[in-house]
Image (tube, rainbow, N blue to C red):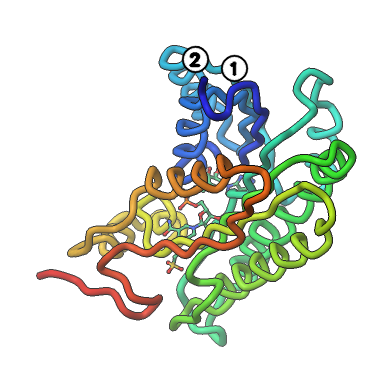
Amino acid sequence: MKRLENRIAFVTGASSGIGRSIACAFAAEGARLILCARRVERMEALAAELEAAHGADVRCRRLDVRDRAEVERMIAEIPPNWAEIDILVNNAGLSRGLDKLHEGLADDWDEMLDTNVKGLLYVSRAVLPGMVRRDRGHVVNIGSIAGRELYPGGNVYCASKFAERAISKGMMIDLNGTNVRVTTVDPGLVETEFSLVRFHGDAARAAKVYTGVDPLTPDDIADAVLYAVTRPQHMNVAEMVILATCQAGTTYVSRKG
Ligand code: NDP
Ligand code: 8X3
């Protein structure tokens, strides 16, 4: 018996990186998947792979988590045989820029706060009432080491991930007394498209982030998420901080060469 057989999982930001790996890990364990992101063609290619490899049942939806009306509509329109979401993974997120606060771009701040904080809130607000009604479910929020420690130029991205951690704890408190669990998974350096997005498509600058280090892979984080969601019902993995061995904190990264 696969560990997530017939469980319905809703994963945001499934077109790339950590969200994509979570989709793969969940599909291999028999979950039925609702995948969301803006680049729907990438998710459709992934869905075809997962169907071929695991016979997975996958639905892909174009969704910009910043658009509250779109989030509410999309979730309200989920057909009844898909609506009882067991696992919500709030993974969609991004960083933009690494500038000093007094030199930063307000558009970058808006994009980070709207996605990482408000997007997470909109999706959770739409999915959680069903979990509470059914008295079962699990919310996994993808935070970051940046939600625990500042670093130069991290200002607003760090603030968004500090907010994610506050919201995770707030959710846990508000859901106490129900069987709905909340986990925050807080990684350090993971090699994905994250830095390419942060540096607005500057591939050379992005590559430098991972040069001379052995970073985490998105599969490492998916493995941790799978661990959290497959614990027995009486056990909630509240927080996981996962760092590459070469990293001791946001500003302590040991590089070779
Ligand atoms: P990627 O850039 O590889 O993936 C980000 C995902 O988020 C994409 O699928 C993207 O999809 C989606 N996304 C971004 N904005 C939106 C939006 N407005 N609406 C819907 N989906 C959106 O980066 P990662 O996989 O690394 O990032 C995933 C999460 O992990 C983020 O929350 C990030 O902050 C966090 N994280 C990453 C770390 C790292 O070092 N990589 C470390 C710690 C945490 P699309 O563009 O198609 O919409
Ligand atoms: C991503 C990790 O350290 O680049 O959340 O902010 S870091």
Q: Nearer the viewer, residue 236 or 243?
A: 236
Q: Which residue is outermost to the bottom?
A: 102
Residue 213: x and y in percent read 22, 63
Q: Is residue 137 above or below residue 256?
A: above
Q: Earlier in the sequence, mark 2 or mark 1?
A: 2
Marks 2 and 1 close (CB-CB < 8 Å) = yes
Q: Crowding near pointer 1: few (<14 within 10 Å), some, many (20+)?
A: some
Q: Quadrant of residue 77?
A: top right
Q: Nearer the viewer, residue 5 or 162?
A: 5
Query: Label 1 is placed on what type of residue?
Result: Asp
Residue 36 lies left or right of residue 118; in this view the side is left
Residue at horizontal 37 percent and vertical 62 percent from the top: 189
Residue 111: x and y in percent read 64, 61
Residue 51 tag number: 2
Q: Quadrant of residue 210?
A: bottom left
Residue 171: x and y in percent read 77, 60
Q: Quadrant of residue 9?
A: top right
Residue 120 lies left or right of residue 35; in this view the side is right
Residue 248 tag number: none
The secondary element bearing badge 1 is classed as loop
Residue 20 lies left or right of residue 81; in this view the side is left
Q: Crowding near pointer 2: few (<14 within 10 Å), some, many (20+)?
A: some
Residue 141: x and y in percent read 62, 54
Mark 2 → mark 1, Cα distance in angstroms: 7 Å
Residue 121 lies left or right of residue 99; in this view the side is right
Query: Label 2 is placed on what type of residue?
Result: Glu
Residue at horizontal 48 percent and vertical 69 percent from the top: 145
Q: Is residue 247 above or below residue 75?
A: below
Q: Which residue is mark 1?
A: 57
The C terminus appears in which quarter of the rendering? Answer: bottom left
Residue at horizontal 56 percent and vertical 35 percent from the top: 39
